[in-house]
């Protein structure tokens, strides 16, 4: 089984961090590649973050309300 790291994406050149607004999926949920995984807020805009791969969400490292840096490891999916 391969681990897929979910990293906070950078949606704009000036984006350095974002707040986790809501996890759409929970630990133990199956996810498909490209399926909405969570919502983040950056620069007053809320954006859905798609899953980078298919598998089971096994770990959430950043909780709702947390502010995290771009490219931070925020969750793990096991393919």
Image (cartoon, grey):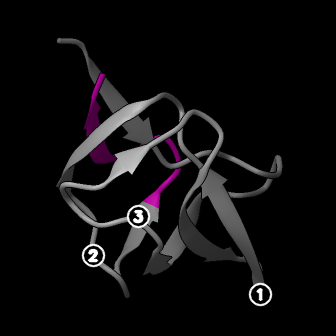
Tell me the residue at 68%/46% (across/down).
10
From the image, give the main secondary structure of the stretch colored magenta: strand
Q: Secondary structure at mark 3?
A: strand
For the N terminus, the image quarter is: top left
Give the CA separation, mark 2 to mark 1: 19 Å
77 on left or right of 7: left
Q: x, y (%) of residue 59?
A: 17, 50
Q: Secondary structure at mark 2?
A: loop
Say if mark 3 contacts mark 1, CB within 8 Å.
Answer: no
The residue carrying mark 2 is 63
Residues packed near mark 2 inside 10 Å, few (<14), some (14 to 19) or many (20 plus): some
Q: Answer above or below: position of 46 versus 47.
A: below
Dot 3 or dot 1: first in sequence order is: 1
Tell me the residue at 20%/60% (across/down).
27
The residue carrying mark 3 is 68
Q: How many numbered callouts?
A: 3
Viewer-proximal residue among 69 and 54: 54
Q: Quarter-wise, where is residue 17 in the image?
A: bottom right
Residues packed near mark 1 inside 10 Å, few (<14), some (14 to 19) or many (20 plus): few
Q: Quarter-wise, where is residue 7 in the image?
A: top left
Viewer-proximal residue among 43 and 36: 36
Tell me the residue at 35%/83% (across/down).
64
51 on left or right of 67: right
Q: Nearer the viewer, mark 2 or mark 1?
A: 2
Q: Please provide the residue range marked out in magenta.
A: 69-79
């Amino acid at each position: 089984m391969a681990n897929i790291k979910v990293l906070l994406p950078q949606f704009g050149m000036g984006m350095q961090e974002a707040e986790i607004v809501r996890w759409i999926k929970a630990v133990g949920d199956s996810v498909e590649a490209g399926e909405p995984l969570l919502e983040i807020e950056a620069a007053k805009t809320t954006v859905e973050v798609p899953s980078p791969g298919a598998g089971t969400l096994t770990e959430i490292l950043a909780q709702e309300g947390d502010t995290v840096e771009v490219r931070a490891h925020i969750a793990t999916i096991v393919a």
